[in-house]
Image (cartoon, rainbow, N blue to C red):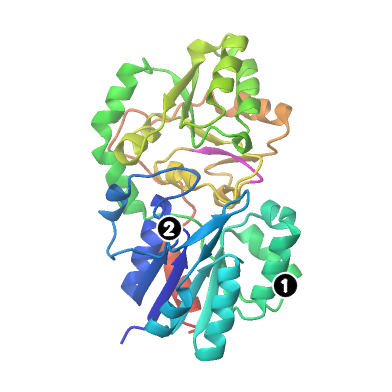
């Protein structure tokens, strides 16, 4: 008989599809989301739901407060009583996690209670005093934490040696992502024609056009590189409040021919961009993980990744390079070494070879054993 699993989570994002599907396969799972979409960006939930092997439930009764829209939600204690879980998973160190963990240990002391925390080491170190207090209080009742990367685990194990940890990065199932990429090949070919990308060296960014993504620095450094490398194009896929400022910066630097603001895409229209790229870049100054790094590596695209991003744990000497996102000279040096190298498979859409150091399938067994306390 499967153990009963109860999950409380903020919202369902595309990069969590495979994790929750795997949990539903391994447990008798009930999962409740506190929002019907992400606050930072809105996804097509119909497309996401079509890929699930479970029915998501929502617990939206309550309100948000503060600049960071912290959540107050009602009814989650009733769900614990209703489902009597063998395993409870909460998110990070919110008051919901603290109350749910304390209540569960009081009413169902045999239930294992875990938290998922995606913090990079940088984010964990710089968190607010309120979060530090919440973290310490939650540790009293938690049986363990699921962390997003190995560097964070090393930091946690040093500062909090009594708390059990396991690493499960924000990674997705390779077969599913590859299937989407392959089905999007006609769209990829259309992009190449539409934006005249034939025989170009392509540097790709996918994400929100916001301050922490550090795109001003990226464009500044890229402008210096293309002075002598006019055949290189930077493609920015996404949208955000810094878009108009970034367009002005590109115009002032007179590199309009080398920078494309492609707009925001989802599902096949998004994944169709990856086969075009020779290199992918994530230059963020703050990034708890960066699911796009996993997607790029699955597509066989080497990654130039900020060493402050949690996803930097996926990078090795065979699939990319990491860099200090405040160091312009370092990034320019990387561009000079990497951007002139064109991927052999750029036009061979049948041969995407993953550059991931491991797969979700390889990682999920350890996670399940951890959660089941085996």
Residue beneath disc 2: 359
Is 227 displayed left or right of 235 in the figure? right
Whichever of labels 2 and 1 marks the residue nearer the N terminus, that label is 1
Residue beneath disc 1: 160
Q: Quadrant of residue 158?
A: bottom right
Is 227 displayed left or right of 343 in the figure? right
Depicted 198 relative to depicted 107: above or below: above
Residue 73 coordinates in the image, percent (x, y): 50, 66
Q: Quadrant of residue 210?
A: top right
Q: Which secondary structure, mark 1? A: loop
Q: Which residue is more in the foreground, 17 or 210? A: 210
Which label sits in the foreground, 2 or 1? Answer: 1
Q: Is residue 193 magenta?
A: no
Quadrant in which the N terminus appears: bottom left
Q: Which residues are magenta?
A: 302-308
Answer few, some or many: residues within 10 Å of disc 1's Cα (few below 14, many 20 plus, some between 14 and 19).
some
């Amino acid at each position: 008989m499967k153990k009963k699993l109860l999950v409380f989570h903020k919202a369902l994002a595309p990069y969590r599809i495979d994790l929750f599907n795997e949990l539903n396969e391994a447990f008798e799972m009930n999962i409740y989301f506190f929002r019907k979409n992400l606050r930072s960006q809105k996804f097509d939930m119909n497309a996401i739901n079509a890929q699930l092997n479970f029915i998501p439930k929502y617990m939206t009764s309550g309100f948000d407060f503060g600049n960071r829209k912290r959540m107050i939600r009602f009814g989650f204690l009733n769900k614990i009583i209703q489902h009597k879980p063998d395993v409870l998973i909460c998110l990070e160190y919110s008051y919901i996690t603290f109350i749910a963990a304390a209540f569960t240990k009081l009413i169902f002391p045999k239930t294992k209670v875990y938290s998922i925390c995606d913090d990079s080491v940088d984010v964990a170190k710089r968190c607010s005093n309120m979060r530090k207090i919440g973290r310490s209080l939650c540790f009293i009742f938690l049986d363990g934490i699921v962390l997003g990367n190995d560097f964070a685990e090393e930091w946690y194990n040093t500062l909090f040696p009594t708390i059990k940890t396991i690493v499960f990065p924000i990674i997705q199932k390779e077969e599913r992502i590859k299937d989407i990429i392959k089905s999007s090949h006609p769209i990829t070919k259309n992009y190449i024609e539409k934006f005249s990308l034939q025989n170009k060296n392509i540097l790709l960014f996918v994400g929100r056009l916001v301050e922490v993504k550090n795109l001003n620095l990226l464009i500044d450094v890229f402008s210096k590189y293309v002075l002598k490398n006019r055949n290189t194009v930077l493609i920015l896929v996404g949208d955000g409040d810094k878009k108009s400022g970034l367009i002005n910066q590109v115009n002032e630097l007179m590199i309009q021919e080398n920078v494309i603001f492609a707009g925001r895409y989802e599902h096949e229209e998004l994944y169709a961009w990856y086969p075009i790229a020779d290199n992918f870049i994530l230059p963020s100054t703050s990034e708890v993980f960066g699911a796009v790094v996993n997607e790029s590596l699955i597509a066989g695209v080497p990654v130039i990744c900020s060493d402050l991003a949690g996803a930097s744990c996926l990078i090795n000497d065979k699939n990319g390079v990491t860099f200090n996102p405040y160091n312009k000279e370092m990034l320019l040096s990387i561009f000079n070494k990497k951007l002139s190298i064109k991927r052999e498979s750029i036009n061979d859409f049948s041969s995407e070879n993953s550059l991931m150091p491991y797969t979700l399938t390889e990682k999920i067994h350890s996670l399940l054993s951890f959660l089941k306390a085996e």
